[in-house]
């Protein structure tokens, strides 16, 4: 039997869950900010386990569906091997994540600068330009110290992102007035 909730009850549940999720994200973000090395390694290990689980599930599917076609085994084998490599060499995984972030920040920075210049007559264009410049500076900071800076920058950036997400969720939850 389907249960229906009133709008007031749904809003109350959303408000409560937003605040709880916000507090948890904020705490996780603080861990990332104050212990960036641990956060970076945890992220690398987590991705390693996800690859192993994904490769195993893909391998099971391949075994049940395409077990006679050797080409179908490439993906699950690569996923499992890559996951094992991340578990055995987590610092290398953090460096790889750092390299991906370097690429991201440069692309984000150039896009931000181009959007800012494109939107120049519109109010607020300078914020877009500033955002692009900051992204490029973060990319340069990452690149100068890479791969060694990855161990603290990856965790710090993930921590800051989680912290901001948590604050946002709490603000949304506390701002609901019903």
Image: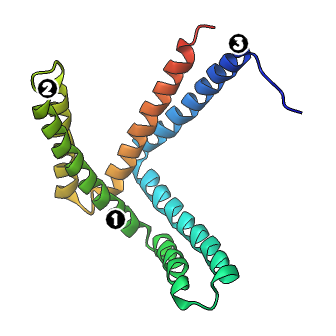
N-terminal of the two: label 1 or label 2? 1
Residue at which label 1 appears: 96
| 169 on left or right of 130 | right
Work out which quarter of the rendered image holds the N terminus and state it: top right
Q: Residue 132 in the image: x percent, y percent?
A: 18, 38
Q: Which percent across, then down, holds residue 21?
A: 59, 31
Q: Specify which label sits upstream in the sequence, 3 or 2.
A: 3
Question: With 119 as the anchor, is 72 left or right in this view?
Answer: right
Residue in view at x 59 percent, y 7 percent: 177
Q: Is residue 146 above or below residue 72?
A: above
Mark number for residue 126?
2
Residue 71 in percent (x, y) is at 51, 87
Considering the numbered disc 3 on the image, is that residue within a helix, a strand or a loop?
helix
Circles 1, 2 touching at the beta carbon (< 8 Å): no
Residue tagged 3: 8
In 3D space, how far apart are the residues under numbered discs 1 and 2 (Cα atoms)?
Answer: 33 Å
Contact check, label 1 and label 3, Cβ < 8 Å: no
Residue shown at the point (70%, 12%) measured from the top left: 8
Mark 2 crowdedness (10 Å alpha carbons): few <14, some 14-19, many ≥20: some
């Amino acid at each position: 039997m389907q249960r229906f909730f009133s709008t007031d009850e749904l809003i109350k549940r959303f408000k409560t869950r937003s605040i709880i999720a916000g507090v948890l994200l904020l705490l996780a973000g603080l861990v990332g900010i104050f212990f960036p090395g641990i956060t970076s390694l945890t992220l690398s290990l987590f991705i390693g386990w996800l690859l192993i689980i994904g490769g195993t599930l893909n391998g099971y599917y391949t075994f049940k569906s395409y077990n006679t076609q050797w080409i179908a085994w490439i993906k699950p084998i690569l996923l499992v091997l890559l996951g094992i490599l991340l578990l055995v060499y987590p610092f290398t995984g953090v460096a790889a994540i750092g390299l991906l972030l370097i690429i991201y920040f440069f692309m984000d920075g150039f896009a931000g600068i181009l959007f800012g210049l494109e939107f120049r007559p519109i109010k607020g264009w300078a914020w877009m330009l500033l955002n692009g410049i900051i992204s490029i500076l973060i990319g340069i900071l990452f690149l100068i110290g890479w791969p060694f800076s990855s161990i603290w920058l990856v965790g710090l950036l993930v921590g800051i992102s989680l912290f901001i997400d948590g604050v946002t969720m709490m603000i949304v939850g506390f701002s609901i007035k019903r």
